[in-house]
Structures are given as C-alpha cells and as structure tokens.
Image (spheres, grey):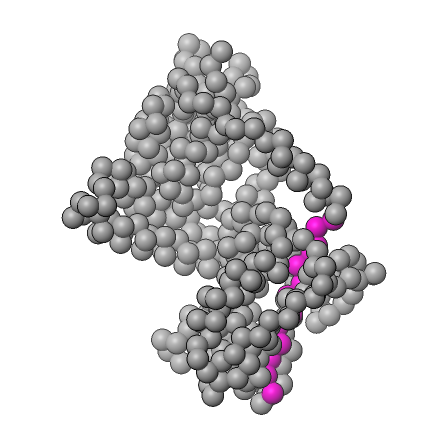
Amino acid sequence: MQLAGGVAHDFNNLLTAISGHCGLLLLRHDKNDPDFSDLMQIHQNANRAAALIGQLLAFSRKQNLQVKLLNIREIIADLAHLLDRLVGEKVNLLLYHGTKLPIVRADKRQLEQVLMNLVVNARDAMVEGGDVVIRTQSKTFDKAHERDSAVIPAGEYVKIQVEDFGSGIPPEHRQKIFEPFFTTKRTGEGTGLGLSTVYGIVKQSNGFIFAESEIGKGTVFDVLIPAVDRRAKQKEQKLIAEVVSPPTQCEQVVLLVEDEAPVRAFASRALRIKGLTVYEADCAEAALKILEDKSLKIDVFVTDVVMLGLDGPTWVRLAPIDRPGTRVVFVSEYAEDAFDKQQSEIEGSVFLPNPFSLNDLTQAVLDVVVPAS
C-alpha cells in the first residue's frame, strides 16, 4: 500500500503537468489544426495512464471516489451494450434484476469498473464459451452476519452477483485471488490487478465481496453494497435541489502552493487565463512568508495536501488569524476521506482530486470564490 501511494503521488504530479500543459495547447488549436490530433493523442494517453494509477490506488483503497446516489439497475442497463461487446460472440450475457432495488451511494465510474472486471474474468474462465449471469436483488440482514471471516453489519444491501460456468478456481488459489499482481493467466494476458481493484473499490464503498467456486462447474462472485437510508436519501435530494449557481467571476486573488514546479507552472497559467491574480509558493513556509504582507488580499488558497515540510491542512491552520474567511482548495491524489477530519475543521474548504484537468482546477476555484462586495 505504501508503494502504491508513493508511486501515485509522483506519477499523478507528472500526469497533471502533462495533461495540463496539453490542455493549454489545445486552447490555441482548433479541430482543423494539423497538430490537434497529436495533442488529443497525448491528452487521451495521459488519461489512460491516470486510469492505471487508479487501479494501483484501488487495492490500497486510497483512490478518489466521486460518490453519488445511484440506481444499480440503471447502471447495469447503461453498461449492458459495452459488456456484450466485452464478452464476445461465444459468451451470452444474461441479466436478472430483483424488484424494488434500493438506492446506493457509490462512485458510478468505479462501480462500472467492478462490473467490467468481474464480467471479463467470467468470460476468460469459459474458453469454449457459455453464459455469464448478472443478478441483482435487495438483501436485508436483521442482525450482523458472518461470512468467510467477515462480519456484515445489520442493514439493507444491494447484492450484485456475477456467475460463470467455467473451469472454476483451484482451492489453493482462492485465498489469493484478491491479492495485487496475483494471476493464473499466462504472461501478457493479465496484470493481476483486476480482482484486487474490484476488492479495493468495494471495500472503499463500505461493501463486501465474496467468491464461491467449484472446479469444472464455475465461480460466483457476490458483491454487497450498503443501501442508502430512505430518510438520508430525501435529505440529500433536498440539499441538491437547493444548490444555487456559482458566483460570477470577479477580481479574485489566489495563493497557489505546490512543491512540484511543472504542476505549479500549469496551474498558475490556467488560473491566470481565467483572469485570476495568482501568487505562487513552492512550499508552505514560503506561503506563510507571503501572507506576512498584511496589505495583500487573498481570496482563495489552492494547496497540495502532501508536501515536504508542513502539509496543506497544517499550514492553512497556521495562516494569520486575520484571514479567517479565505476559501481553500485542497489538492491530493489520495482519497478525500484520508484527511477528511482535518479538512472538516477548516471552514470553506473543498477537495480537488489529482490528476486534474485545466477545467477541473479553474471550476473548483471559481466555485468557491466569494464575489467582491
């Protein structure tokens, strides 16, 4: 897990710089420009690299989840065409949905990745073809339930079951299938990250995953995702309905604190393009030095969370007390809940996952700025 987190921190900074500067170039090239297609290739491949880092972070349970209220049946319906293409001509994809499935709170993209990985594994288990069955149903436990050494708390869940009728998993491998880089496939056929990614996503979503298999008969994966309490769902929908449009752009001043020079260069240019005034600091100590100028008006701090010396939340709390109304955008490739308690103690702070695009950054800043009076 420490290896995955360390790789992600460095690699995400590189991806942010590559993708960000590419985004800046795309602003100056239209679709008819001969360089446009090359820039799009760079941009798309940077996104693919970011997806790979997401897999590394998944099994360490540190990836950023964009959590929303979701209907599992709708997710699978939208994904069915792609899943049909993934399984190929020799495999039939069969869907069976339970009635009145409750809503869950999860990341749509990550949940789709769980389904795709499980279906691809099921396909690969049936060399001669066959059926892959996806079933969904509501599952309620009146009291805590134990299964495979895991204790499932009492409550309502959505159960997603993916079943194949293939070769099955040998008993000696069953305890290892969720371990990163473990694979029974030949070299070049798999990375060993598929099921570990699934496991990490499910666990970070507060869910559970179990596997049952019999040699020569097939394998069944059961995924349990907690259902959203109906009262909580109504409250959240009310809050969403009350959200107002972000304030219009005004004269705003940003203090950008980032210890990676390429990321800082891209972020600074992106914010200035939007008409914002930007002061830059390469560490928290330099940021605090800038703030010693009492005449300097700062509207927003944009700061990396993990830096050499003081980290983001620490230096923001040390900022002069006469700047209590300054908004904060925390940037990190680690999951928001990894420092959620620290962030919650800082009023007016929001979280921006890394790697981020030009639009992601500017929108995050514009969403928190307070119009000048």
User: Residue 219 magenta-drawn?
Assistant: yes
Front residue of 152 and 159: 159
Is residue 166 positioned above or below 78 on the image?
A: below
Residue depicted at 44% across the width and 80% down the height: 89
Left or right of 165? Residue 187 is left
Task: State whether residue 261 appears in this view.
Answer: no
Is residue 265 positioned above or below 369 on the image?
A: below
Residue 16 position in % (x across, y down): 35, 44
Task: State whether residue 158 appears in this view.
Answer: yes
Q: Which residues are magenta?
A: 217-229
As drawn, the residue found furthest toward the left would be: 34
Main SS of the magenta part reads strand
Residue 205 position in % (x across, y down): 61, 54
Number of numbered tags placed on the structure image: 0
Front residue of 363 and 91: 91
Residue depicted at 31% across the width and 36% down the height: 266
Residue depicted at 70% across the width and 66% down the height: 98
Residue depicted at 42% across the width and 39% down the height: 360
Residue 50 position in % (x across, y down): 39, 53
Is residue 248 positioned above or below 76 on the image?
A: above
User: Residue 316 magenta-drawn?
Assistant: no
Residue 338 position in % (x across, y down): 57, 45
